Amino acid sequence: MKKILKFLFLSLNLDFFIRKFNKTPRILFWHGVDFIKNNQVEAESFHVEDFKKQIDFLNKYYEIISIEEFYKRFIEDSFTKKEVVLTFDDGYLNNLTVVAPYLNEKNIPFTVFVSTEHIETGELFPTSIARLIIFGTNLKEISIPTLMINESKISNSTEKKEIYNLVSFALKNSPVDKVRDIVDDLKNNLTKKKYNLLVQSYSSVLPMNWEQLRQLKEQGATIGSHCKYHICCHKKQNYNVVKDQIQQSKVILEKKLDYICDFFAYPNGDYTLESNKFVKESGYKMGFSVEKKRISKSLNNISAIPRLGVPSDLDSLKLIMAFYPKVKFKAYNI
């Protein structure tokens, strides 16, 4: 029924009329864009052609501006309400090899938020490792002692999804030391050789290295911080760990890339009052969260400006742009 309603809604161009009414500046975020072989393993990346259709749609109906221009208009309170900012999280290699060539060809600005430790070491992001091990192998059972999972069966799709959901929740809600232990447990289900071969077979999960990140910056992309390790800055994290992650990632990026890093995005969108304070104290101009809230200078903390996650296909994006962020029937002066 939902699919039928969605089809009828879009066929009648009702989204167009709602978008005309629901005007507000928006910051959108993706992760990777690549030539996908396995949707479960490569869930963080969009198919190239789907991404291109989304960009063409946004470029036609909205004003795509840089994050620097967004900051300027935010401070000056001068939004036209047609603005869209394109951002990409984590620092995937395909941001350089796939995203940049297409957007640069169209002179479209974009920002990439990177986790510096992954750029430094080449270590995959925690949920990428979980998906690789659980969905990308033929393992019949899996052990993750940190989560008290010992030789648990994953011989069919249902069992794999159940284990992945449990692991994903733990990765996003645990202190960083425990996250590292879970990652080590996951990798220990394979020999080092088999793990490396598995990684090589899914290039979309690879992070950039420093030289590649420099190339991306030289090609015009804005580079922002996404912590050092890809940690979620929730209340379960140690106070000093979060402070170090936010402050030192900026220091590292500025040293390695020889520029001023003005923008920060929270991994998974998690933040606290303390982490917002660290963003300000570190010298970032703006920090960004992941929330379906309207952007308002009077209502939003400048350290946690809302961003909207982009769905995987164009039709769903049209609906997101029509209905989100939701209109509040109050005076909204942006």
Image (spheres, rainbow, N blue to C red):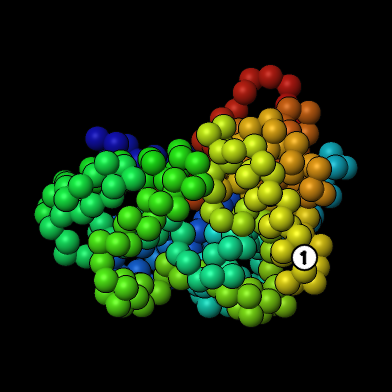
- Left or right of 114, for residue 298: right
Q: Where is residue 74 in the image (x, y as percent from the top left)?
A: 80, 43
* Residue at x-position 63% and y-position 75%: 210
Q: In which quarter of the image is the C terminus?
A: top right
- Left or right of 68, for residue 76: right
Q: Position of residue 284 (x, y in %)?
A: 78, 49
Q: In which quarter of the image is residue 135?
A: bottom left
- Left or right of 228, for residue 170: left
Q: Quadrant of the N terminus?
A: top left
Q: Where is residue 304 in the image (x, y as percent from the top left)?
A: 68, 38
Q: Name the residue under label 1.
A: 254
> Residue pushed farthest right?
76
Can the viewer see residue 64 in this picture?
no
- Left or right of 64, for residue 208: left
Q: Where is residue 306 in the image (x, y as percent from the top left)?
A: 63, 39
* Residue at x-position 48% and y-position 66%: 123
* Residue at x-position 88% and y-position 42%: 76
Which amino acid, mark 1? Glu
> Residue pushed farthest top?
330
Front residue (pair 229, 30): 229
* Residue at x-position 78% and y-position 55%: 262
Q: Quadrant of residue 232?
A: top right
Q: Are there few (<14), some (14-19), or many (20+) residues within 10 Å of tag 1?
A: some
Can the viewer see residue 262 in this picture?
yes
Front residue (pair 24, 33): 33
Q: Please tell me how many numbered marks the rendered image carries.
A: 1
Front residue (pair 5, 184): 184
Front residue (pair 222, 327): 222
